[in-house]
Amino acid sequence: MPEHLQPRRPRRETVTHASALGDRPAPRLRTRPPHPPARSEIDEQTTLGHTYVRSLMRSQLRTGLTALGALALLVGTLPLLLALPAPELLVWAALGVGVYPVVWAIAHWYVRRAERNERDFTGLVER
Amino acid sequence: MNQTYAVTAVTAVVLATVLIGALGLRVSRTTSDFYVASRTAGPRLNAAAISGEYLSAASFLGIAGLVLVQGPAMLWYPVGYTAGYLVLLVLVAAPLRRSGAYTLSDFAEARLESPQVRRLASLFVVGIGWLYLLPQLQGAGLTLEILTGAPDWVGGLLVAVVVTGTVAAGGMRSITFVQAFQYWLKLTALLVPALLLAAAWYGDGAPRARFDAPAVLREHTVVRVADTVRVGLDAPLRVAVTGTVDGVRYEDRTVTLDAGTHRVGAGTVLALPAGSAVPERAGTGSDDPLGWSQPLAGGRDGHQLYATYGLILATFLGTMGLPHVAVRFYTSPHGRAARRTTLVVLGLIGAFYLLPPVYGFLGRVYAPELALTGSADAAVLVLPERMVGGVLGEVLGAVLAGGAFAAFLSTASGLTMSVAGVLAQDVLPSRAVRHFRLATLLATAVPLATGAVATKVPVADAVGLAFAVSASSFCPLLVLGIWWRRLTPPGAAAGLLLGGGSALAAVMATRAGLAPAGWPHTLMAWPAVWSVPLGFLTMVLVSLATPRSVPAGTPAILARLHLPEEFTAPVPAQEARR
């Protein structure tokens, strides 16, 4: 893992909701506590920790559904289009060649986006 | 076809498989090596192995045959096989890897904390695996029969023995190397002859073939019809017949067959003059022996669009639940690598699928009579001899034969590996390597024996059925298990049974001829369109009705599935289940 954590001491703080952490970054100390607070919330499976996980799940699901939507729109509608009287060459070009770069491009977009979601999440939690 | 070259090529492929397997054996020492290659396979090696495993004989031979007989609409098969990986990547890949489990049954148990659901999932894994293994073994028999005239059980037995040997000896580590090698072998074996054949086609004046009209023979052709078929003629046809047509016996007599349907007896030899249209096989009733080159089950009864969407849903959503596909994700070191691996896989199989249509097109031009004899699957194998001829033609044919055998071997190894993994964990008493080897034997022996008893199980049906069942059972389980926190064990079990069970029952009933003609037949032959939503709906509704059964550990396991690895304590491979 690229960003491995330096140990930090937990801050004493009563956390009431998620934004309390998002808005106020932990003070930077020379000697870092063993865990950043949000991280220990996740480790200890508190309600707040679950909220963090849910937010990651939501952003990943959104990304995934966007990719699936693109697939449905670009590939899933092809049978309808090809059911129209179309030159045979078009069928060959679309199904024999054209579909593959489209599928790969969607996959490439998804992988980059999903990794970015994870980086953003890591940044949010470890701040 | 010259047997020497073909036998040499097949022998070379088998030997290389065993040798590379033995190489893997030397580095495969621990139980973890055995099951998951110690999770050290890098994205490129792993992606080549996944692709090598996935591209079965249906891809290597079957797609070209389908295109030859039915035209470019059949290209939905390779498109579906590819897009299935995209859906898998988007919804499942990284969480499946992060679940830290090894088989789909492990995932079911880890997510739902229920041994019952685990057993049910194991049942489906083994069932789908055997459904998929059966056509691989039978296809191997068929290919060897075409190439060398050996009895049809020899090829299946050969593949079973080699696969059982390599898998039992080296486990996952050794088949990772073997399958990565076999991907490149298959690609080369298809690419090089394709280029030469395309050059020959161009040198021949680039003749075109029509797919919306009966194919036309380029030269005087003699065909032997192996099984009794009904053929349809659009126009009267003059043909020299030795055998029976419409119940009348002829001895080398030239007769004119009227337009309409005719029944050609088994073993009849037809001599067709150049320029005549190839009679088309008519009425694919359930008594017809089907090859890969037939639609999954009666796709041509006027509901083509529905059938296409049935195929799309089954392949797009079914890929993620195929046991040999799912098991491969555990060999990635972490979730991010699993995603990147899938991306490489999409590139590799996409590149491969550019080639089979070339053979399908050339087959329609140069060997259209294969559609009549019912051996369209052989198109890839006979084209070099037909188009190039001479020693070069024979060598190219042998290269393709070797590639086809690599296809049987690699897919069969992957399936054997995953079925054996489940058998070793859930049926046999311990996970010791000794029991894994016993399970391997069991995994191949059952489909081999079934194949010997039930000859001519339609290959495409078995593969299509595996996809449909997987899409209606494991797809809902994986997707809801990963993304929905209210899934309960009763919901999952009900969905697996109702979704997967109804898809299985519908196709079986169609095969048995129980489905009434028309829409009911189409609906039952292509179940995915309704059985996938049924599976999802059942899981959701039953889960909502049993809210008390939501497993206590759900939030923790969902966190593990979705959080990047730096947040979660590493789960050692050994502790995944016990």
Image (cartoon, helix red, strand yellow):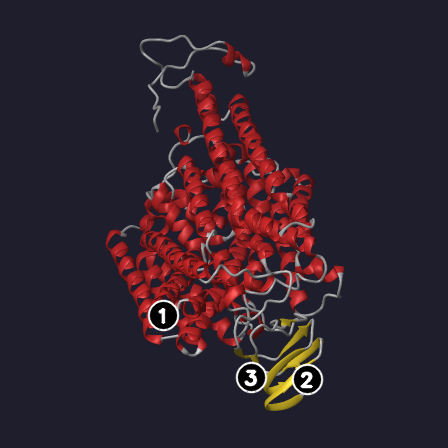
Left or right: residue B478 versus residue B204 is right
> Which residue is label 3 attached to?
B267
Chain identifier of the residue bearing label 2 in the image:
B
Front in this rendered view, residue B396 or B390: B390
The image shows residue B255, relative to residue B487, as above or below, that is below
Left or right: residue B54 versus residue B83 is left
Of circles 3 and 1, the one toward us is 1
The image shows residue A16, relative to residue B139, as above or below, that is above
Chain identifier of the residue bearing label 3 in the image:
B
Of circles 1 and 2, the one toward us is 1
Do the numbered discs 1 and 2 sit on residues whose CB atoms are within 8 Å? no
- Whether discs 2 and 3 lie on one chain: the answer is yes
> Which residue is label 1 attached to?
B394
The residue under the point 50% across, 41% down is A101
Instruction: Give the residue type at disc 2.
Output: Asp
> Which residue is label 2 attached to?
B246
